Image: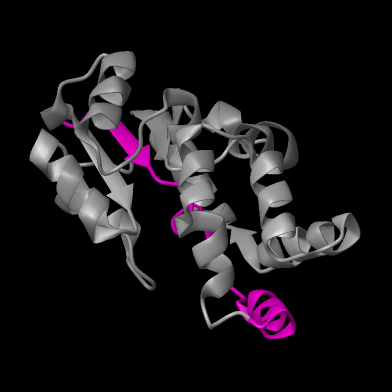
Amino acid sequence: MIQAIIFDVGGVLLRTEDRAPRQQWEARLGLEPGGAEALVFNSEMGQSAQRGDITEPELWRWIGSHLNLSLEETAAFRQGFWAGDKLDWELVALIRQLKTQYQTAIISNYASNLRPELTKQFKIANVFDEIIISCEEKIMKPGSEIFHRALARLGRKPEEAIFIDDFLHNVEAAQNVGLAAIHFQPGIDLPQALEKLGVSLG
């Protein structure tokens, strides 16, 4: 029986709804399409930030240096990079509903800015029983250890939990550990997908 529901953040709870600001900065900086995301997420330093080897401010200092930007330009690029991201408040409402019957948690590959954002900016940290962030754990999805740590802190067996992520390789990794999993995609009917896995929405 399902007892816990675990969510990813980027691409699920927090999604890039408007890519224009990133695209404008890519054009301004002479980057290839997708080059901004490649720097922030997929570069060696971006991965280091998600593993907690460096902080998020240190990542942006490196990005500024790498692109020969001033401090002001780097700050403007950082603001523009995140400008199109929106928190899905309907999903937050669903999670609040789920929390009345189930444990709720986060497993996210993210740099050191996530916990302050959830706590201070969005004020939704209290919606989750556990928040597992790669930079704090020093391990990342799709590695199995991050799933095992989350389950241990929730006090659950793999078959008692559902994991929701927008990347298929993370979904498959969770399934390999024994969790049920949902591939979150645009337009998904998440309540229906949860009900199919035995979740009661009251």
Q: Nearer the viewer, residue 76 or 184?
A: 76
Question: Where is residue 126 shown, x and y percent of the image?
Answer: 58, 27
> Which residue shows up at 49% across the image and 25% down it?
136
- The C terminus lies in which quarter of the figure? top left
Magenta segment boundaries in residue numbering? 1-30
Q: Is residue 8 above or below residue 38?
A: above
Question: Where does residue 97 sit, x and y in percent of width and height?
Answer: 45, 39
Q: Is residue 110 in sight in this rendering?
A: no
Residue 66 sits in quarter: bottom right
Dividing the picture into quadrants, the one containing residue 85 is bottom right
What percent of the width, then of the height, locates residue 129?
45, 23
Query: Is residue 19 covered in magenta?
Result: yes
Locate the N terminus and report the quarter of the image it occupies.
top left
> Which residue lies at the image location 45% right of the left edge and 41% below the top edge?
95
Residue 143, by quadrant, is top left
Q: In this view, does 151 lie above or below 159?
A: above
**Residue farthest toward the right in the current orientation of the protein:** 72
| x then y, percent, for residue 56 | 65, 41
Relative to 143, 118 lies left or right = right
